[in-house]
């Protein structure tokens, strides 16, 4: 499968999925009116990746500054999809600025009830 | 006369502490531009990061609610499909706090459901709102709501005081709906 590379736009994040390395990075902001326009392609690529079944570990790095409520819902769907995936180790790094309570709290909300994936809250200053 | 008239209009807005107010047809592009100006204005005034985020978040959710649910829309094709929704979004400050008010027309048939959702949220304390948010995050979306429930919870979650809302009847089929959120 091919790498997924999407440049950031005014209301959508930069996406970089290096399939061979098993690293997906999502950076920036996400508040399109229709969250599926942003998350649809990421979901499809993740499904392909997880369906390969070759055991490549997956690391997902989030560096999000702001997202709207429909993007939050899409992110939760993504974490549930990763939680239910079997066959490879999955690590999520949820990065937030140390003074950003909102993004920290979102990380905590998302990580609750996830037991199969490793979810790291990463504070940066 | 012209300048006097509009100066009076602007003074009236200033007296209410209004930072900016938009009335008319909203699009995602306008939302982006207004939101950008709003964040810059707050950053220049050394507003703390958490407050800027809360104000911006409520502004986005309220504007997107107007774009999605306003009963006053124009649609058409200008080479690409275009949908504009009418309403108003106002940001201001009073007693040292920011507030965001949105207003738009809604249909009679949608009013009770919206009122019910808002009353539920107004009756909840901070912990209950947080728990409700987490619960709704894990629910499949309501049929036809395009994410309304989670958006309203997000708004209530960022508020520092209970949300205020009201409906003003226009005629048998329509109401003017208003929601005020203080940060």
Image: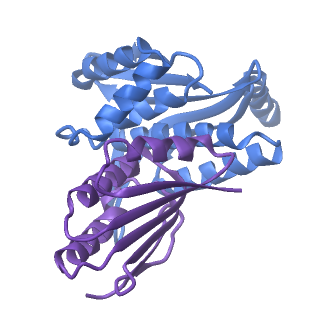
Q: Quadrant of residue B101?
A: top right
Q: Which chain is purple?
A: A
Residue A119 % position (x, y): 42, 55
Looking at the image, residue B183 lies above or below residue A115: above
Q: Position of residue B24 (x, y in %)?
A: 51, 41
The residue closer to the viewer here, A67 or B143, is: A67
Shade representing chain B? blue
Q: Report whether residue B169 is seen.
A: no
Image quarter of the C terminus of chain B? top right
- At x 33% / y 17%, what residue is drawn? B115
In the image, is B146 to the left or to the right of A60?
A: left
In this view, B57 is above or below B95: below
User: Does residue B135 appear to the left or right of A53 in the view shown?
Assistant: right
Q: Identify whether B118 is placed above or below B101.
A: above
Q: Is residue B155 visible?
A: yes
Q: Position of residue B139 (x, y in %)?
A: 23, 39
Residue at the image position 30 percent from the left and 34 percent from the top: B136
Residue at the (45%, 34%) spot, across then down: B154
Name the residue: 41% across, 67% down.
Answer: A60
């Amino acid at each position: 499968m091919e790498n997924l590379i999407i440049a950031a736009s005014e209301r959508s994040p930069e996406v970089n999925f290096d399939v061979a390395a098993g690293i997906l990075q999502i950076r920036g902001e996400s508040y399109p009116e229709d969250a599926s326009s942003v998350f649809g392609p990421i979901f499809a690529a993740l499904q392909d990746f997880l369906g390969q079944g070759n055991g490549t570990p997956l690391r997902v790095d989030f560096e999000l500054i702001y997202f709207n409520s429909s993007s939050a819902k899409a992110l939760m769907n993504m974490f549930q999809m990763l939680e239910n995936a079997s066959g490879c180790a999955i690590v999520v790094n949820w990065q937030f600025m140390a003074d950003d309570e909102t993004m920290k709290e979102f990380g905590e909300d998302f990580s609750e009830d996830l037991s199969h994936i490793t979810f790291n809250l990463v504070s940066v200053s | 006369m012209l300048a006097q008239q509009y100066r009076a209009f602007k003074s009236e807005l200033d007296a209410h502490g209004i930072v900016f107010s938009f009335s008319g047809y909203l699009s995602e592009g306008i939302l982006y531009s207004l939101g950008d100006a709003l964040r810059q204005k707050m950053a220049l005034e050394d507003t703390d990061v958490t407050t800027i985020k809360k104000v911006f978040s409520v502004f986005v959710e309220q504007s997107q609610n107007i774009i999605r649910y306003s009963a006053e829309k124009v649609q058409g094709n200008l080479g690409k499909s275009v949908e504009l929704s009418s309403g108003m979004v106002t940001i201001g400050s009073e007693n040292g706090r920011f507030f965001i008010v949105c207003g738009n027309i809604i249909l009679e048939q949608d009013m009770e459901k919206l009122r019910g959702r808002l009353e539920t949220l107004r009756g909840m304390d901070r912990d209950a709102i947080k728990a409700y948010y987490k619960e709704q995050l894990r629910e499949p979306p309501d049929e036809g709501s395009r994410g309304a429930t989670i958006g309203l919870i997000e708004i209530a979650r960022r508020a520092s005081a209970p949300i205020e809302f009201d409906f003003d009847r226009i005629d048998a089929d329509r109401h003017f709906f208003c929601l005020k959120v203080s940060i």
